[in-house]
């Protein structure tokens, strides 16, 4: 029950533009159930143990660790991968995500800045930098980056979702809802995007609509737990600061 920035979460395969390097789809295990995360993590742990220098396995293993709340271990895995693949942009982007999840925003910003290449724009790297800037409270700069990334990936739902959540951090619920609705309508939209839309609708005071949106994604007990959370946020004077902190 959190509002969390979606740092390039969708695994939608994009056709590469001439100006956009063909990067691997960013792995995301955040929509799996706890049991599925554990199963996936066990499989990836075994694969990583047998082949720790494989960059794709390291990236997926770190993503599964983050989904399991083990951001510190994800950072350690990718620090090793960075030593093995110092010029690999995908590894750098994954490392920046892990650092962000671990709350090390300044370090993450330095890593992602080194990964962004003006001559070969990468929507995923731009999105990650935007999410880091949002966490640092630099929302206008973050939104410029999401908008720039949309030039290279115009139908990527995570970009619209990140833009919507950025607006939620500055209490602009109308703009937040607009972008989250568009994100939810795009191919590849995740359950987490739809749940974040439900949260914003609930924070706008439209409880029944929010409940219906949650009900399409979650079992009844989790629906009511989320509705209780929405109401509790509306009673908190610092609710927008809590959103910004992902709490």
Image (cartoon, rainbow, N blue to C red):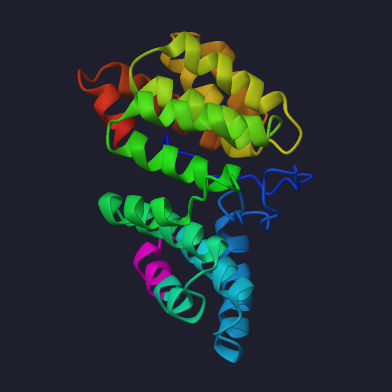
* Camera-nearest residue between 130 and 167: 130
Q: Between 218 and 46, which is closer to the camera in this rendering? A: 46
User: In the rendered structure, does residue 71 fall within the stretch colored magenta?
Assistant: yes
**Image location of residue 75, percent across then percent down:** 38, 68
Q: Nearer the viewer, residue 145 or 186?
A: 145
Residue at (55% x, 30% y) in the render: 148
Residue 225 visible from this viewpoint: yes
Q: Residue at x 71, y 54 (%)?
A: 22
The magenta span reads: 68-76
Which quadrant: the N terminus? top left
Q: Quadrant of residue 235?
A: top left
Does residue 41 appear left or right of residue 156 in this picture?
Answer: left
Residue 150 locus on image (x, y percent): 62, 30
Residue 218 in sight? no
Residue for point 48% across, 18% down: 176
Up the image or down, 26 lies above or below 87; here it is above
| Callout count | 0
- Is 22 magenta? The answer is no
Residue 110 in picture, x, y percent from top left: 33, 54
């Amino acid at each position: 029950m959190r509002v969390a920035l979606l740092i390039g979460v969708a695994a939608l395969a994009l056709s590469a533009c001439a100006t956009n390097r063909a990067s691997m789809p960013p792995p995301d295990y955040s929509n799996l159930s706890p049991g599925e995360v554990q199963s996936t993590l066990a499989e990836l742990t075994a694969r990583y143990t047998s082949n720790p220098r494989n960059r794709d396995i390291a990236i997926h293993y770190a993503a599964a660790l983050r989904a399991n709340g083990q951001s510190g271990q994800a950072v350690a895995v990718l620090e090793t991968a960075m030593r093995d693949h110092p010029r690999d942009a995908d590894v750098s982007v994954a490392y920046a995500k892990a650092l962000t999840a671990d709350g090390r925003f300044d370090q993450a910003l330095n890593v992602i800045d080194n990964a962004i290449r003006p001559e070969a724009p990468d929507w995923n790297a731009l999105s990650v930098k935007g999410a880091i800037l949002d966490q640092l409270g630099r929302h206008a700069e973050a939104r410029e980056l999401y908008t720039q990334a949309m030039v290279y990936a115009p139908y990527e739902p995570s970009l619209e979702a990140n833009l919507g959540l950025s607006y939620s951090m500055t209490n602009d619920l109308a703009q937040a809802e607009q972008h989250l609705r568009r994100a939810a309508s795009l191919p590849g939209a995740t359950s987490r995007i739809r749940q974040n839309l439900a949260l914003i609708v609930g924070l706008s005071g439209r409880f029944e609509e929010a409940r219906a949106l949650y009900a399409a994604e979650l079992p009844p007990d989790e629906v009511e737990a989320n509705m209780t959370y929405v109401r509790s946020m509306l009673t908190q004077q610092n609710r927008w600061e809590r959103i910004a902190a992902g709490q």
